[in-house]
Amino acid sequence: MINRLLLVLIAGMIFSGCATTYPDSEREIISSDPTTEELLMHGDPQILSMLNTYRDSLNSVVGKRVATVMDTLTFGKPESSLGNLVSDALRFRAARETGRYINIGIIGEDSFRLFLMPGELTYGEVMEFMPYDNHLVVLTLTGAKIRELTNQVAAIGGAPVSGLRFRIDQGRAQGVLVNSQVLNPNQHYTVATSSWVANGGDKFPAIWEYSDRLDLVNVDVRELYLNYFESRREISPILDGRIR
């Protein structure tokens, strides 16, 4: 529903701003028709009327309160309050959807566009925060690949992770724990992430060499965050030393 309303808003912006999109050469030809010129200057009254009927409902949706942010949450390295929040959300939802324990959640900061500031968090702000249409993916990786993954995270100074604990020493991950257990290179681990990351859209090539992949195509990542933030009601920054 939210995506459809946004499309209506975008359409309105296109039609109301179309007077500035025509080259001068085309404008000279079109302007010979006064009706078309009026449309270019003021927009199609029928379309604008239709958009106006959606305006209130759109504003009521995008302005709806999702949760209250108690303090500023930002991304940072090696660990951050916002990184912890978004990676925990992936892992939590994947466990609920699959009915099984999910070992790790991971996603890159590049998947997001805003920090979370104190005050009411609205639907519209969450859509800006996660503007992309991706779905939830659960991958199965060997412990050896998880080791590679932690080193890749360490090499960039940290990333949003859940279920992992380690320290960075000279660009390498040391003392790696998965769910408080020492990483076993021969064991298989489940990893929750987005389809964009799983498809090669981030800085974690170890993820691309999975043993198994489950695409939860009905779980949109944007909706996932909306649901997760709503369920918490109040969002506070949490740093627990998962990456040191």
Image (cartoon, rainbow, N blue to C red):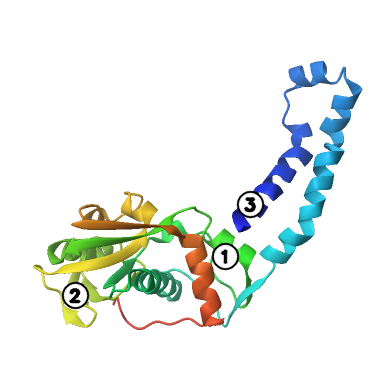
Type of the residue with mark 1: Val
Instruction: Tell which of 206 and 152 is nearer to you.
Output: 206
Residue 52 coordinates in the image, percent (x, y) = 81, 51
SS class of the residue under badge 3?
A: helix
Please tell me which of labels 2 and 3 falls first in the chain. 3
Disc number lying in front (3 or 1): 3
Q: Quadrant of residue 189?
A: bottom left
- How far apart are labels 3 and 1 at the CA level? 16 Å
Instruction: Tell which of 45 and 167 is nearer to you.
Output: 45
Please tell me which of labels 2 and 1 falls first in the chain. 1
Whether residue 19 is visible, yes or no, is: yes
- Mark 2 in CB contact with mark 1 (< 8 angstroms): no
Tell me if 148 is positioned left or right of 92 in this view.
left
The residue beneath circle 3 is 4
Give neighbour class at mark 1: few <14, some 14-19, many 20+ (Cα, 10 Å). many
**Residue drawn 78% across the image and 60% down it:** 56
- Residue 126 numbered tag: 1
- Residue 176 numbered tag: 2
